[in-house]
Amino acid sequence: MAGNKNLAEDPYERLANAIILQAVADYRVALKKIKAHPKDRKAIDEVLEIEKFFHSGWCSQLTSVDGEYLVKRLQDEVRQSESIRGRKNKSNRR
């Protein structure tokens, strides 16, 4: 039954997914650092490095998800989470 092998059990597939998920997590953290400290050169460099990875051929070999889509989606997510947090803080002050 080798033909019915579940891709989720494939160690190479798991490794590829783990690499992408780590890049996503690192990108979120770096974006949040920039939001808090816009001149943080280390965070800016990290964002640029991860964006370069998302646009690379290696990334496209690891996943079928478009790198530019990931970048825009994560930027929107961080932007929205920060605005939601701001609204919660204002309502808690009342």
Image (cartoon, rainbow, N blue to C red):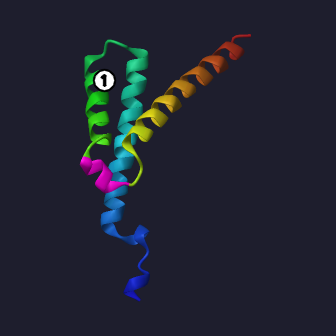
Q: Residues within 10 Å of mark 1 (few under 14, many from 20)?
A: many
Would residue 23 be found to the left or right of residue 93 on screen?
Answer: left
Between 38 and 93, the one lying in front of the other is 38
Position above or below: 51 against 41: below
Residue drawn 45% across the image and 33% down it? 72
Secondary structure beneath dot 1 equals helix
On screen, residue 19 above or below 87: below
User: Is 50 colored magenta in this rendering?
Assistant: no
Q: Quadrant of residue 64?
A: bottom left
Query: x, y percentage for residue 86?
Result: 60, 17
The residue drawn where x is 26% and y is 43% is 56
- Say whether residue 69 is left or right of residue 86: left
On the image, the x and y values in percent for residue 18 come to 35, 53
Image quarter of the C terminus: top right
Q: Quadrant of the N terminus?
A: bottom left
Number of numbered markers: 1
Give the side of residue 44 with respect to residue 94, left or right: left
Q: Quick one: which residue is furthest to the right in this view?
A: 94
- The residue wearing badge 1 is 43
Residue reaching furthest to the bottom: 1
Q: Which quadrant of the view contains residue 46?
A: top left
Q: Is residue 62 magenta?
A: yes
Which of the two residues, 68 or 82, is positioned nearer the viewer here? 68
- Decide if residue 87 is on the left or right side of residue 59: right
Majority SS type along the magenta span: helix
The answer to whether 44 is drawn above or below residue 51 in the figure is above
| Tag 1: amino acid | Ala
Q: Which residues are magenta?
A: 57-63
Pinpoint residue 28: horizontal percent, then vertical percent.
42, 33
Q: Residue at x 37, y 34 (%)?
A: 27
On the image, the x and y values in percent for residue 62 come to: 32, 55
**Quick check: 58 above or below 6?**
above
